[in-house]
Amino acid sequence: MVAARLIEYAEAGPEVRAVYDDIKRTRNVPDVNNFWKIIANHPPTLRRTWESLKETMAPGALDPLTKEMLYLAVSAAHGCEYCIASHTAAARKRGMTDEMLGELLAVVGMASETNRLVTGWRVPLEEAFR
């Protein structure tokens, strides 16, 4: 069930249209995806989220493919179906192969398992790790 309606470009106010235009220009896409259309119900959240995401995902010390794969890993760990689909597609556009996806998901699975074991057993932290 959708928590709010999708705000399409044609019905959007000037503040939302400005963000949509920036997303389309930055990502070179004809339309924004549903994530943006939902959060456009609250324009300050739309603008803040887009600006933060644009800055975070810009090329830097980490290349764009690595950033997309990290985003995908966190999305998988959190179980966000929409984010998994979105960032898998974005990572594939940037060159992620089936083999890379398999290894990424294996690492996510292993980290989740060992994290639960450490948490459950309350493993004390060694001094060398501090």
Image (cartoon, helix red, strand yellow):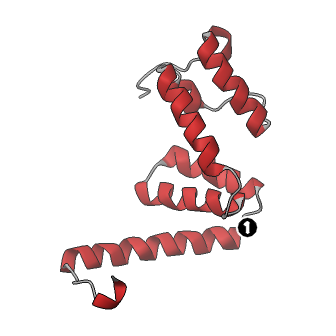
- In this rendered view, identify the residue nearer to me: 109 or 62: 62
When the figure is inspected, residue 100 is found, relative to residue 23, above or below; the finding is: below
**Lateral position of residue 88 relative to residue 119, left or right:** right
Residue 57 position within the rendered picture, expressed as x and y whole percent measured from the top left: 64, 50
Where's the N terminus, which quadrant?
Answer: top left
When the figure is inspected, residue 50 is found, relative to residue 124, above or below; the finding is: above
Where's the C terminus, which quadrant?
Answer: bottom left
When the figure is inspected, residue 4 is found, relative to residue 64, above or below; the finding is: above
Residue 34 position within the rendered picture, expressed as x and y whole percent measured from the top left: 58, 30
Residue 15 position within the rendered picture, expressed as x and y whole percent measured from the top left: 60, 16
Q: Is residue 129 visible?
A: yes
Residue 28 position within the rendered picture, expressed as x and y whole percent measured from the top left: 80, 36
Residue 20 sits in quarter: top right
Residue under pointer 1: 97
**Residue drawn at 49 percent across, 54 percent down:** 75
Picture mark count: 1
Q: Amino acid at mark 1?
A: Thr
**Lateral position of residue 98 relative to residue 74, left or right:** right
**Residue drawn at 68 percent across, 58 percent down:** 60
**Lateral position of residue 66 relative to residue 43, left or right:** right
